[in-house]
Amino acid sequence: MFDVIVIGAGIVGLATAREILLRRPRLRLAVIEKEARVATHQTGHNSGVIHSGLYYRPGSLKARACVAGAAKLIRYCDERGVPYQLIGKLVVATSPDEVPRLLELYERGQKNGVQGLELLTAEQIREREPNVTGVRAIWSPRTGIVDFARVAEAFAEDVRLVGGEILFERTVLAFQRRNGRIGIETTGGFYEARFVVVCAGLHSDRLARLSGGRPDPAIVPFRGDYYVLRAERRHLVRTNVYPVPDPRFPFLGVHFTPRMDGSVWLGPNAVLAFAREGYRKTDVDLRDLMETLRYPGFRRLALRYWRVGLQELWRDLSKRAFLRDLRRFVPELDEEDLVPGPAGVRAQALSLDGQLIDDFVLERQPGIVHVRNAPSPAATSSLEIARLIVDDIERELPA
């Protein structure tokens, strides 16, 4: 019998468990995880960018959580000795028609309280990144990089130090409510708690429905494939280089992301994954695929963005098409510079009417709170998201 159970040992689940125990160290708390280690899926396949809060709608929970969360994350890394680097980010307009959107983005960043933003000319872009081409750019010096799996491992250590348990290889099968407690049937045994927090990422909708929650938003998995810049050509970029977002399209587009290990990731694209945990093009899970295809929201999204979907699919299949998009920013790139790299799967929450859910979504049930959507920049924002969740549920936690 536990006071609190957190389901999911990704970065948001572990940050939430940590926050609960910091406030209530006497509680008996367990984290239940279906894999054999922490940070196996979205956290472990993250691009590793500490976002500054530049992109998000002013006043939105996403914007506030990112700005506050980034500051908390950097302080935490300093205190715990987790390596990170504030290498900055260039958001580059490669043509004059992108400049108005770039200026709007700059204003958005100012309203969000992002520190140190600068507007650069073409010449100033070259001064910062000699191999990058653009007509104007935003320089965001507070953008950084970190290994989020390592951050999650540090959170897990914190949970254990305060007396929490992390129980691996336990897939949740069912929920029961009895005598004011929540029963959780798993592949590794039956557990009870007075309160449950569900941070299930790619399976968040399924676990919400399993405990009696709404059918939407549903999770539709999108795979993002990366190339890696050939080691001898890593000097071509020293900072994060991003495109100006196009509001007509649902995804950001390819970008350049230096990593803590010295590598540089190029991408990703965004294509429908045929499995929620399908990190290879050939991975297919018939249950996952049929669930996606039968969901009315996906069909409406596909009708709205079918041209974009075909473009993303072509870029996924054609290295030359991928290279063409990258060369808008670094013309010196050649096809042999691109080495096949890793992939991640994004848990995209989608409403019944086909709208991409862009902000954090919590669903309350008696004795349970579900994190139904924690989109990027959830890793950056994880400590602030944890604070918000625990602020919301603290009155319901056992004394």
Image: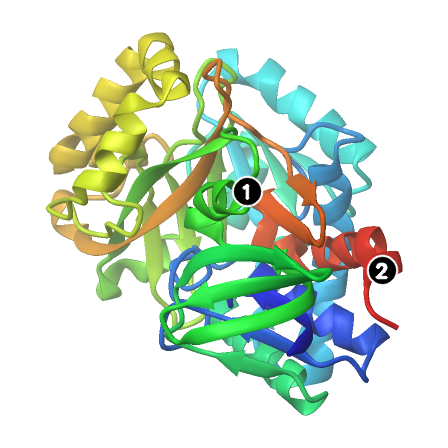
| Placement of 177 over or under 273, stated as above or below | below
Q: Is residue 183 in view from this perspective?
A: yes
Residue at 83% x, 58% y: name it. Answer: 396
Q: Nearer the viewer, residue 21 or 80?
A: 21
- Amino acid identity at mark 1: Pro
For label 2, the SS is helix
Quarter of the image where one finds residue 111: top right
x and y, in percent, of residue 199 in the image: 56, 55
For label 1, the SS is loop
Pointer 1 local density, CA inside 10 Å: few below 14, some 14–19, many at least 20:
some
Question: In the rendered view, does 131 fall on the left or right side of 386?
Answer: left
Quarter of the image where one finds residue 35: bottom left
Question: In the rendered view, does 307 fall on the left or right side of 39?
Answer: left
How far apart, in angstroms, are the residues tagged by discs 2 and 1? 24 Å
Residue at 38% x, 16% y: name it. Answer: 296
Mark earlier in primary sequence (2, 1): 1
| Placement of 137 over or under 232, stated as above or below | above
| Placement of 165 over or under 265, stated as above or below | below
Task: State the mark number for residue 375.
Answer: 1
Task: State the mark number for residue 394.
Answer: 2
Q: Nearer the viewer, residue 228 or 97?
A: 228
x and y, in percent, of residue 31 in the image: 56, 73
x and y, in percent, of residue 181 in the image: 68, 63
Q: Nearer the viewer, residue 303 or 250?
A: 303
